[in-house]
Amino acid sequence: MEQIGKTIGRRKYEALKALDLENITDETLIAFNLQFKNLTVGEGLKMIKDYEKKFTYASKEQAKKVADYFERINQPEKPKEKKILTKEVLWDLFSKKYFDQNGIKYSKEDESLENIKPLIYYFVGDYENFKRCSNLSRLSVPSFSKGLLLIGGYGTGKTSVMKAIQSSLAHSNVSFKTKSTNDIVTEYEGCTDQIQKDEFWRNLTNYTWNFDDMLTEREASNYGKVNIMKDVLEIRYDKKNKTYGTCNFNDNYPNDMDHGLMQFGEKYGSRVYDRLFSMFNIIEFKGKSYRK
């Protein structure tokens, strides 16, 4: 005979419960006797009650643990604590990253320092010094709500400087990602279905991006021609997502800011050109080419 009060398992409990012993019929009694030959109906009812008494409390306790867990994971993410980044700290980080990546120390000549100053002041949030930088173009009203557009001659260090700045800010709250516009076209042309294209557009039109070598990319071809960067810039403008970029002066008009920026209208259309000045703080990179 089953021991009265002995804890039964879940399967036996479910089998006893399914027989509805409190409202047992002759037909159910036959089934009960076949399954539980040495057990009386009273003993079966007690086993059910003992099981429920023991596990009801446990299930409530477990339910609370589960509820607490989901409450924790569904809490809105706390904003990252902003670390105080000073110009001295960022300069030291930048200098180290630049040397690691290029094998040379960043030049402390006046032209080079004037190139880097607006970037340092921009990323540490020093607006008063930022707006006074000599290489910051007055064609666009200085604002930290805008991104950055670095324009200059070939080899003046735009790409290498932004790469070192990106590495310096990798673990900060002002980090960004970089991709060359030529790589963007190649990536789009490699999309083989609509799902990949949707992911491509979602990625490029969100987050903070630095688009390197703007104006140099070819028109993309993927079952039709697409001016990728024109569309990316227009969507990012509409979403108010901060954008950084680098580009060169017009070959026919070296060191001419106006003609350099007019290339955007020629390449991406008048809408993008008109929005340049509300999208970007425009910084002119000056000096001789570092390329040998």
Image (cartoon, rainbow, N blue to C red):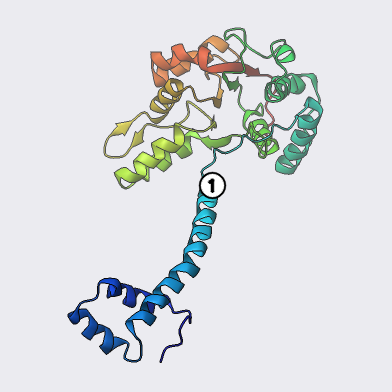
**Badge 1 density bin: few <14, some 14–19, many ≥20, Cα 10 Å:** few
Q: Is residue 62 shown above or below 5?
A: above
Screen quadrant of the N terminus: bottom left
Q: Write the residue at 68% across / 14% down.
A: 135
Residue farthest along the front direction in this orientation: 42
Q: How many marks?
A: 1
Determine whether, in the image, residue 234 is placed left or right of residue 62.
left
Question: Quadrant of the image for the C terminus?
Answer: top right
Residue at 70 percent across and 19 percent down: it is: 118
Q: Is residue 224 above or below residue 65?
A: above
Could you say where residue 263 lies in the image, as x and y percent from the top left?
47, 17
Q: From the viewer's perspective, is 47 left or right of 85?
A: left
Which residue lies most toward the left here? 27
> Is residue 76 visible from the viewing direction of this image?
yes
In the picture, residue 199 is in which quadrant? Answer: top left
Percent coordinates x, y for residue 221 in the rendering: 32, 37
Is residue 268 shown left or right of residue 111? left
In this picture, residue 13 sits left or right of residue 214: left
Residue occupied by mark 1 = 73
Q: For mark 1, give the secondary structure.
A: helix
> Which residue appears at 40% of the width and 40% of the height?
200
Instruction: Examine the image and state in which quarter residue 11 appears.
Output: bottom left
Vertically, is 203 above or below 15? Answer: above
Q: Is residue 133 visible?
A: no
Q: Choose between 53 and 192: the one closer to the eye.
A: 53
Instruction: Give the image location of residue 226, x and y in percent.
Output: 33, 31
Identified by mark 1, the residue type is Ile
The location of residue 238, given as percent across then percent down, is 42, 21
